[in-house]
């Protein structure tokens, strides 16, 4: 079992506005947007050089925790077993996501969410 990389994931009320700003102001590139039936972006990836940043248009959380750290692993089920055995809290088992990867998430004692992924998001058609 190996950890392969780490990706930030940011939540915004308006992902389209945030992505447009990141491209225009920060020079980020390659935005891939998953849109709902109304045309609004609900998920996206954008790149700062080779670093991929996930973006959610699902709104910000009321408690101010608007970032998730995505840890890419080669075997999410084995990593889940390791985390579950060591955690002092309940952890939901890995699930296959409709957008591609198999994932599970745990919130640390300070409120940060750590989401472990096996596989990548599949771009929309």
Image (cartoon, helix red, strand yellow):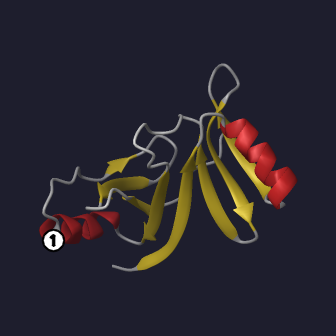
* Residue 125 in view of the camera: no
Task: Please state the horizontal and vertical placement of residue 34, each as a whole percent of the image.
Answer: 65, 38
Q: Residue at x 86, y 51 (%)?
A: 24
Residue at 35 percent across and 69 percent down: it is 75
Q: Is residue 64 left or right of residue 124?
A: left
Q: Quadrant of the C terminus?
A: top right
Neighbourhood count class around disc 1 (C-alpha, 10 Å): few under 14, some 14–19, many 20 upward: few
Residue 63 seen from this side? yes
Identify the element where label 1 is drawn: helix
Residue 91 drawn at (x, y percent): 21, 54
Q: In the visual, does 21 lie left or right of 119?
A: right
Extreme residue in the bottom direction: 2
Whether residue 53 is situated above or below residue 123 in the rendered picture: below
Q: Dot 1 corresponds to which residue? A: 86
Q: Of residues 64 and 35, which is closer to you in this image?
A: 64
Q: Quadrant of the N terminus?
A: bottom left
Q: Residue 71's quadrant in the figure?
A: bottom left
Quarter holding residue 14? top right
Specify whether 69 is left or right of 87.
Answer: right
Residue at image point 75% right, 50% down:
31
Taking the view exactly as shown, the residue that stands out farthest to the top is 38
Count of labels in the image: 1
Q: Which x, y percent locates residue 86?
A: 15, 71
Residue drawn at point x = 79 percent, y = 47 percent? 21
């Amino acid at each position: 079992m190996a950890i392969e990389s780490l990706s930030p994931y940011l939540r915004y009320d308006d992902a389209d506005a945030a992505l447009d700003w990141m491209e225009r102001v920060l020079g980020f590139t390659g935005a891939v947007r998953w849109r709902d039936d109304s045309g609004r972006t609900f998920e996206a990836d954008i790149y700062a050089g080779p670093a991929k940043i996930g973006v959610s248009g699902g709104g910000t959380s009321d408690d101010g925790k608007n970032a998730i750290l995505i840890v890419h692993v080669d075997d999410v089920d084995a990593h889940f077993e390791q985390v579950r055995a060591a955690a002092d809290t309940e952890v939901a088992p890995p699930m296959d996501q409709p957008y591609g990867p198999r994932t599970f998430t745990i919130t640390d004692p300070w409120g940060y969410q750590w989401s472990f992924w096996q596989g990548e998001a599949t771009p929309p058609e």
